[in-house]
Image (cartoon, rainbow, N blue to C red):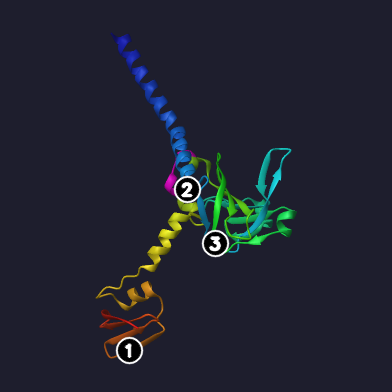
Amino acid sequence: MRLRTFVLVALTASLMFRAHAKEPNDSKESLKQKLFARYDQQSVVLIPWRFLMGPRISQKLWGVDYFSLRADHFYKSMQVPKAFRKASVIDEGTFVSANQQGVSNALVSEPHEGFNVLKFYVKENEVILSLDSRTPGKTGYGLDFHFVFPRDLLASGDYEAIIKEINQYVLPQREDVQESEAAKKVEIQPGMSKEDVIKSLGEPLKTIVFGNRTVLKYQDVTVELVDNKVTELKAN
């Protein structure tokens, strides 16, 4: 009886160990599937402006092709390798490097310029998007964007943390459109303070103060406040 109990306990422990051992791999595989669905062969926008783009280079002998310019972005908790100190700096964690052809034939991206993701890769510590510009006159130009993450972060399958980092630079076009539409909708409610109005509409063209009354004049609307609370909104 004791032997049978011991075997049962050992078998249960073995199964539990195997289940836990598979979790990281299962998490990473699930992460890959989600990332491929989000980016591979999709339309995206490059949010920052003035990114350099280079022509696409094909090496038929080796069966590979790539853009002559690449960007490398390092996750916020990572130390940037010294080798990138000589690269062109976009921000403290993002760098652009190029070969000679890329430097002499580079074009510059516009804010929220549209790109197609030609190729997409998820490696041990990188997520790579090969971005081809959709702008007329820039066809065949783009860059390979390498997002470098800690290995344990990718292994953990933390999808939200990964896309939050990438979203600062590359955003699916549908989400960019949704954000632009949301930005157009501004709500001003009775009782809002002057600070709340300015946060929503920006600084007014003119501010008129008369006793406890304040009038904020904008190009399209005029907002009136009494005792620092919105009482009226008029279209100009």
The residue pinned by badge 1 equals 209
Q: CA distance from mark 2 to mark 3?
A: 18 Å
The answer to whether mark 1 and mark 3 are in CB contact below 8 A is: no
Q: Decide: few, some or many residues near mark 3? Use Cα within 10 Å; few <14, some 14-19, many ≥20.
A: some
The answer to which quarter of the image holds residue 121 is: top right
Q: Earlier in the sequence, mark 1 or mark 3?
A: 3
Q: Which mark is residue 48?
A: 3
Q: Is residue 13 above or below residue 154?
A: above
**Magenta-drawn stretch contains 159:** yes
In this image, 119 relative to 22: left or right? right
Q: Earlier in the sequence, mark 2 or mark 1?
A: 2
Q: Nearer the viewer, mark 2 or mark 3?
A: 3
Quadrant assignment for the C terminus: bottom left
Q: Amino acid at mark 2?
A: Ile
Instruction: Determine the secondary structure under disc 1.
Output: strand
| Residue 83 screen position, x and y as percent | 67, 51
Q: CA distance from mark 1 to mark 3?
A: 39 Å
Instruction: Determine the secondary structure under disc 3.
Output: loop
Quadrant assignment for the N terminus: top left
Instruction: Determine the secondary structure under disc 2.
Output: helix
Q: Amino acid at mark 1?
A: Val
The residue pinned by badge 2 equals 162
Q: Earlier in the sequence, mark 2 or mark 3?
A: 3
Residue span colored magenta = 155-162
Frontmost residue, 2 versus 124? 124
| Residue 160 screen position, x and y as percent | 42, 48
Frontmost residue, 95 versus 140? 140
Q: Is residue 144 above or below residue 15?
A: below
